[in-house]
Image: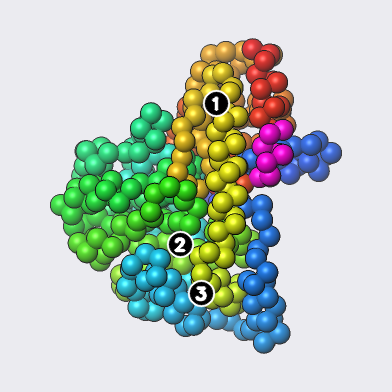
Amino acid sequence: MDILSQRIKRLPASATLTMAAKARELKNKGIDVIGLSLGEPDFNTPEFIKDAAIKAVNDNYNSYSPVDGYLELKESICRKFKRDNNLNYSTSQIVVSTGAKQSIANLCMVLLNPGDEVILPAPYWVSYSAIVNLAEAKSIILPSKIENNFKVTPNQIESAINSKTKLIMFNSPNNPSGTVYSEKEFREIAEVLKKYPDIYILSDEIYEHINFGLTHFSIATIPELYDRTVTVNGVAKAFAMTGWRIGYIGAPEWISKACNKIQGQITSGANCIAQRATITALDAPVEKIKYMIDEFNSRKILIIKLLRSISGFKVNDPDGAFYVFPDISYFFGKKIGDTAIKNSTDFSLFLLEEAHVATVTGEAFGNNNCIRISYAASESNIIEAIKRIKKVLNKI
Ligand code: GLU
């Protein structure tokens, strides 16, 4: 519609949510689709968290909460940051939002001016570039290679920096590649960033606990960067609470105040019952959710082994999150049955239509050679999905 704003016209739809909707549509038509598109734990929210929510309902937590979240929740977030990340934040530096996605949107809206540049190491989560676009800033994409486990180098970052650079977004463990940057790698990157005091850092740590090898490192612990880093986290992934919609930031106070202001005009405080349940989730020892992490790890081992048995797939071994990001560029320029494959979007759609397996095109994440496969699915679904993919690729 021509009447719609320029803003919405230039905004791409979220590829992850679009693919999930497509898969749902096919399922509703009775087609047995295996959904490996959405990054969403297939576990139920743990009982002790559900009990806290039920108690909150019975305790009549039904009124608006403060815009930036209940004080008790912000205190619990401060304890979490100290305990897990060695980060000291006071409650005035915390803003609770309706999911980490809103936390990121708040930050971009309050920090970016039209024409500012934002460095996105690719592959990056779909919504980063879309939110940057909404803020009328420009995404500067840094490519990476599967051979290098999809990591960008400090030199690459430095060569992308200019006087317009305002923000850089890190996401470790990474969606869509599962890549985890080590402390050493972050410290090397920090050496570059220390030279540019006008650049702000967003560290999206939503997959922090889904880490199978390296120790998680928060870049805000580097003293020279603390005052210009915003640490984003939430409960969706680690606690199987995607639909509860609770994300939060720890930030310099002037940024948290600005985020509070914008949130106050757009959504107000996050859902009050979910906030109360989040206090219980964050105060619980991390051991309580270890069964889910262990399960993700065994599924990762399984899916890597199976994907490596498909000829034409290049697969690395990621350290975290619950995604693999195989390079499928071998199939470009080939015809599979009647379908000509030109890029990752063609390939992902082909898998949906012919194998009834939903994945997400790498194009949406800034890498057109790959597709994202979420293994937040049962082992039997993973096995069946790979069997189907192999079968349709045999038509080549
Ligand atoms: N973050 C998840 C994903 O990447 C959920 C969907 C979304 O918000 O993008 O699949």
Q: How many labels does the image show?
A: 3
Badge 2 or badge 1: first in the primary sequence: 2
Image position, residue 35 (x, y; %): 68, 41
Image position, residue 296 (x, y; %): 58, 48
* Amino acid type shown at disc 1: Arg
Q: Nearer the viewer, mark 2 or mark 3?
A: 3
Task: Please tell me the numbered disc located at residue 308.
Answer: 1
Neighbours of disc 1 within 10 Å: few (<14), some (14-19), many (20+): some
Q: Mark 2 and mark 3: span between their CA atoms?
A: 15 Å
Residue 189 visible? The answer is yes
- Residue at the image point whose x is 50% and y is 48% from the top: 321
Image position, residue 310 (x, y; %): 59, 22
Q: Nearer the viewer, residue 170 or 223?
A: 223
Colour scheme: rainbow
Above or below residue 73? Residue 226 is above
Q: Which of marks 2 and 1 is in front?
A: 1
Residue 360's image quarter? top right
**Span shown in magenta:** 377-384
Tag 3 residue:
283
Task: Please tell me the numbered disc located at residue 340.
Answer: none
Neighbours of disc 3 within 10 Å: few (<14), some (14-19), many (20+): some
Residue 303's image quarter? top right
Q: Mark 1 and mark 3: span between their CA atoms?
A: 40 Å
Neighbours of disc 2 within 10 Å: few (<14), some (14-19), many (20+): many
Above or below residue 114? Residue 371 is above
Secondary structure state at the residue bearing disc 3: helix
Q: In which quarter of the image is the C terminus?
A: top right
**Residue placed farthest to the right in the image?**
30
Badge 1 or badge 3: first in the primary sequence: 3
- Residue at the image point whose x is 41% and y is 55% from the top: 204
Tag 2 residue:
233
